[in-house]
Amino acid sequence: MPPDEGNGLHLCFAAPTRDSVDAFHAAALRSGGKDNGPPGPRLDYAPGYYAAFVIDPNGYRIEAHHDG
């Protein structure tokens, strides 16, 4: 399925630690991804929710998150 900015779809991966979320974001940017939300708490999502968002070189939106 090709990326579609209008549909709100994104892929989300659970990360074991906050450091893993940070590493995901850094690796994605080094690999040609674009920042779509830097690593940090997302208290509007849930208490303890920590996430980062990128758009990969193909245009897909990807999130890594850690609850805790």
Image (cartoon, helix red, strand yellow):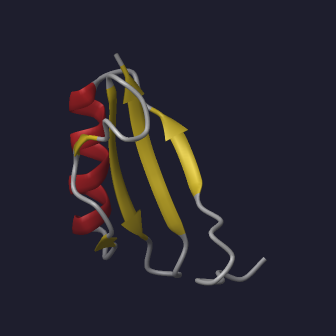
Residue 49 vertical position relative to residue 61 in the rendered view, above or below: above
Residue 33 vertical position relative to residue 63 in the rendered view, above or below: below
Q: Nearer the viewer, residue 17 or 67?
A: 67
Q: Residue at x 25, y 28 (%)?
A: 18
* Quadrant in the rendering for residue 55: bottom left
Q: Quadrant of the C terminus?
A: top left
Q: Is residue 46 left or right of residue 21?
A: right
Q: Is residue 60 left or right of residue 3?
A: left
Q: Residue at x 51, y 67 (%)?
A: 61
* Quadrant in the rendering for residue 15: top left
**Percent x, y for residue 45?**
43, 39
Q: Quadrant of the N terminus?
A: bottom right
Q: Which residue occupies the extreme right position in the image?
A: 1
Count of numbered marks = 0
Residue 4 vertical position relative to residue 64 in the rendered view, above or below: below
Q: Residue at x 65, y 65 (%)?
A: 9
Q: Is residue 25 left or right of residue 64?
A: left
Q: Nearer the viewer, residue 20 or 4?
A: 4
Q: Residue at x 30, y 39 (%)?
A: 21
**Percent x, y for residue 48?**
32, 23
Q: Nearer the viewer, residue 49 or 54?
A: 49
